[in-house]
Every structure is written in structure tokens, then in C-alpha cells.
Amino acid sequence: MEQIKVQVDWCGKNYASYINDPRICGVVLSTAKTFEKLKQETEEGVKFHIEACVADGDSIPETICKGEYELVYEKRVSAILHEAQQYTTLTALSRVTGIRHAQLSHYANAVSQPRPEQKARIFEGLHRIGESCLALLS
């Protein structure tokens, strides 16, 4: 089964997904208020896009034309930080990671993207916060 990578960001007040895959001839974009709705919109958008490409005579792999593909969603830091704010604050994450609150806010609002080292610190910080919460129950 073919895999098609879908990048997911948080942009202002919506999730946004985009696919830039040469096998399906271009970019497919979707937005939605919730991640579940975004997945639904993206799946419908990809099907419609593939049908349109086939109708236009574009070269699409047969497996994809037959629907033998899987959308693989990859949340970027902005989407992860948006979801994490249900459980913690950027201030708490700043304390744990040592990354300035203002910089975390830029990442959360997709104003800038963190370098790989910063991304690793953010993920490690989220893990530490989660472990600390679990330790409260022990």
C-alpha cells in the first residue's frame, strides 16, 4: 500500500494540512477546527484531487488510482503545542525546557519552525511534564 505523507500545522484558529507529493501531481490543502474534521476533509480532498488528475489524463500510479494508499499524518510542532495546551501551559513548558516563552509562542503559532535540537527539547519537555503528572498518582 502506498503511503502519502500529510503535514499538519496549527494556523491561527484552524488545523491545516498539506500534501506535496509528485505522485499525485501537486498540492492538496485542507483546513478545519478539529484534527478529526481535518482528517475527513483531507481524505475527501485527496480523493477528489486524484479523480480530477485522472480525468485530466495526468500520470498517477495505478495503486493510488485504485485507492490503495494510506494517508500518514505528521503533526508539526505548532499542532503538537496547540494540543498540548489542553494539559499544560507554554509557561510550564518554558520552565522545563529552558526555551523562552516568546519563542515557544512563535512555534505554537507557526510564526517560525524550531530547529531539530529545539524540537527535541520541546518533545522531551512534554514527556517530563507527563511523567511528573503520572508521578503524582504514585
Image (cartoon, helix red, strand yellow):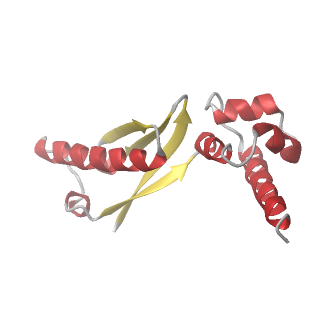
Tell me which corner region of the image, top left, top right, bottom left or bottom right, holds residue 41: top left
Farthest residue in the front direction? Answer: 137
Residue 24, percent from left and from top: 29, 48
Residue at 62% over, 41% down = 82
Farthest residue in the bottom direction? Answer: 138
Side (left or right) of 81 relative to 6: right
Residue 29, percent from left and from top: 38, 37
On-image quarter of the C terminus: bottom right
Residue 23, percent from left and from top: 31, 51
Count the marks: how many? 0
Q: Nearer the viewer, residue 52 or 84?
A: 84
Side (left or right) of 18 relative to 87: left
Residue at 66% over, 43% down = 81
On-image quarter of the N terminus: bottom left
Side (left or right) of 79 relative to 51: right
Residue at 47% over, 43% down = 34
Residue at 58% over, 43% down = 79
Side (left or right) of 108 relative to 98: left
Residue 47 drawn above or below residue 130: above
Q: Nearer the viewer, residue 70 or 64?
A: 70
Tell me which corner region of the image, top left, top right, bottom left or bottom right, holds residue 131: bottom right
Residue 5, percent from left and from top: 44, 53
